[in-house]
Amino acid sequence: MDRCKSDESSQRRERVRRERVKRERVSRKKIKVREKAEKSRSTLFSQCFVAQEGRKVGSLKQHVRSHLISQMRAQLYGCTPSWR
């Protein structure tokens, strides 16, 4: 009788241990997926909203302004713009 109870309790302990290990494995997988998603989100954010290196903020305005001025000159005076 004692032996039967001992076998049952060891089987139960083993089953509980396997379930705990499985829960831990699933939890680690979920954490990895969350970290991966967070990393890709931060990468996308930095690609979209962070100024690119090597380009000053005012240089784009200056480039657009000179482009528009050269187009206006071309229309007014009939000459080809310098940017072509």
Image (spheres, helix red, strand yellow):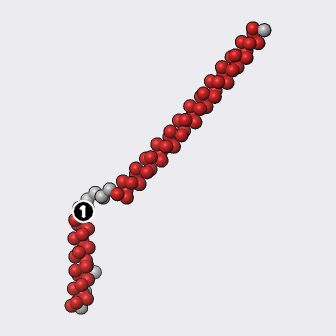
In percent of width and height, residue 48 lies at 37, 58
**What secondary structure is marked by label 1?**
helix
Q: Position of residue 65 (x, y in %)?
A: 23, 75
Q: Position of residue 18 (x, y in %)?
A: 64, 27
Residue depicted at x 25% and y 77%: 67
**Vertical side of 81 occupied by 41: above or below:** above
Left or right of 84? Residue 28 is right
Q: Is disc 1 surrounded by few (<14), some (14 to 19) or many (20+) residues within 10 Å?
A: few
The amino acid beneath tag 1 is Val
Q: Is residue 40 left or right of residue 61?
A: right
Q: Position of residue 8 (x, y in %)?
A: 73, 17
Is residue 81 in sight in this rendering? no
The image shows residue 21, relative to residue 82, as above or below, that is: above
Residue drawn at 24 percent across, 69 percent down:
61
Quarter of the picture holding the N terminus: top right
Q: Residue furthest right?
A: 1
Quadrant of the image occupied by residue 10: top right
Quadrant of residue 16 within the rendered picture: top right
Position of 43 compared to 52: left or right? Answer: right
Look at mark 1 in the image and give the residue it sits on: 57
